[in-house]
Image: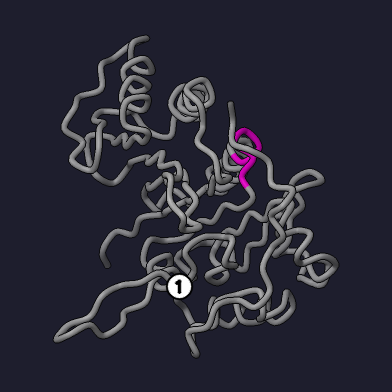
């Protein structure tokens, strides 16, 4: 069985993190959380080597300030981080922090606990309304769909970002204030083992213990069960390819870190 990667997306408010905010984020990720040892950086080609020592953050921040985004990777492509804020556009696309690592880490309870704490810390730092985590194939299945185009097909998003609602239920769903308000008391109807309040403003909804259960019959059945309790109208309809009819109110959404 091929190795699976875990993808975690922390969605940003419709604002660009400042240099000081981005530096604080990178310091947390690489110095405190130690997600991986950064080896390469740049755009998708990752052509620049990361210098060792104290100059690491200075070099990464110089690239971020010049280009407005940043990708950092370990020696292999299994571990990498994207800091990709939104760009000026009439479309509702919002930026995100994307972290990819081996799904094998999730077999350890201590790693899963640290993952939840670290995602929560970053959500609060950037005032994120939503973070999602699952294996890459499950992300692709729920956030993209193939449509015919000429003699072939192309991939289009199911929902372009959280302002259009939720693409589905994944392994870990960190719902910030707009989604907690949207679901309201329905969150209290979920089985206690699937719902964990993280302070007063964020709730973690987790249908099953491990992300590798996402495409199993039992995993999909549990997703359907929880979606029925939270309200199917809050999620993309993958059978009929229709957007959620109930979406979060984002008027009170905070700004990104400054």
Residue in the picture at 26% in, 31% down: 41
**Of residues 190 and 232, which is closer to you in this image?**
232
* Residue 160 location (% of width, % of height): 47, 64
| Residue 53 forms part of the magenta stretch | no
* Residue 191 location (% of width, % of height): 76, 70
Quick check: 16 left or right of 117? left
In the rendered image, which quarter is residue 164 located in?
bottom right
Quadrant (top left, top right, bottom left, bottom right) of the N terminus: bottom left
* Residue 256 location (% of width, % of height): 59, 36
Quadrant (top left, top right, bottom left, bottom right) of the C terminus: top right
In the rendered image, which quarter is residue 205 located in?
bottom right
Numbered circles on residues, count: 1
Quick check: 210 left or right of 255? left
Task: Using the image, determine if residue 78 lies above or below residue 236.
Answer: above
Task: Using the image, determine if residue 154 lies above or below residue 196.
Answer: below
Point out the residue furthest to the top here: 54
Label 1 crowd (10 A; few <14 / some 14-19 / many >=20) = many
Residue in the picture at 47% in, 51% down: 8
**Of residues 151 and 111, which is closer to you in this image?**
151
> How would you classify the magenta stretch by its main secondary structure?
helix
Point out the residue furthest to the bottom here: 240
**Of residues 99 and 45, which is closer to you in this image?**
45
Residue on which the image places disc 1: 158
Task: Using the image, determine if residue 51 lies above or below residue 196.
Answer: above
Residue in the picture at 24% in, 30% down: 40
* Residues in magenta, as a range: 123-128
Point out the residue furthest to the front here: 90
* Residue 233 location (% of width, % of height): 67, 80
Q: Secondary structure at mark 1?
A: loop
């Amino acid at each position: 069985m091929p190795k699976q990667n875990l993808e975690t997306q922390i969605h940003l408010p419709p604002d660009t993190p400042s240099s000081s905010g981005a530096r604080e984020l990178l310091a947390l990720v690489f110095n405190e959380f130690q997600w991986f040892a950064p080896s390469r950086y740049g755009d998708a080609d990752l052509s620049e080597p990361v210098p060792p020592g104290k100059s690491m953050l200075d070099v990464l921040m110089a690239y971020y300030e010049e280009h407005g985004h940043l990708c950092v990777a370990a020696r292999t492509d299994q571990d990498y981080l994207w800091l990709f804020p939104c760009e000026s556009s009439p479309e509702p696309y919002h930026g995100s922090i994307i972290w990819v690592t081996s799904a094998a880490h999730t077999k350890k309870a201590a790693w899963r606990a640290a993952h939840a704490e670290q995602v929560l810390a970053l959500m609060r730092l950037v005032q994120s309304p939503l973070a999602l985590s699952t294996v890459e194939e499950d992300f692709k299945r729920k956030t993209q769909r193939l449509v015919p185009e000429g003699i072939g097909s192309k991939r289009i998003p199911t929902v372009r970002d959280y302002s259009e609602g939720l693409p589905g239920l994944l392994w870990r769903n960190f719902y910030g204030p707009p989604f907690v308000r949207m679901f309201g008391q329905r969150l209290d109807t979920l089985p206690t083992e699937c719902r964990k309040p993280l302070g007063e403003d964020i709730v973690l909804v987790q249908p099953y213990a491990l992300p590798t259960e996402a495409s199993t019959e039992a995993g999909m059945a549990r997703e359907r069960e929880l979606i029925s309790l939270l309200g199917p109208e809050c999620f993309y309809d993958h059978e009929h390819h229709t957007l959620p009819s109930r979406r979060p109110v984002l008027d009170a959404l905070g700004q990104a870190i400054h």
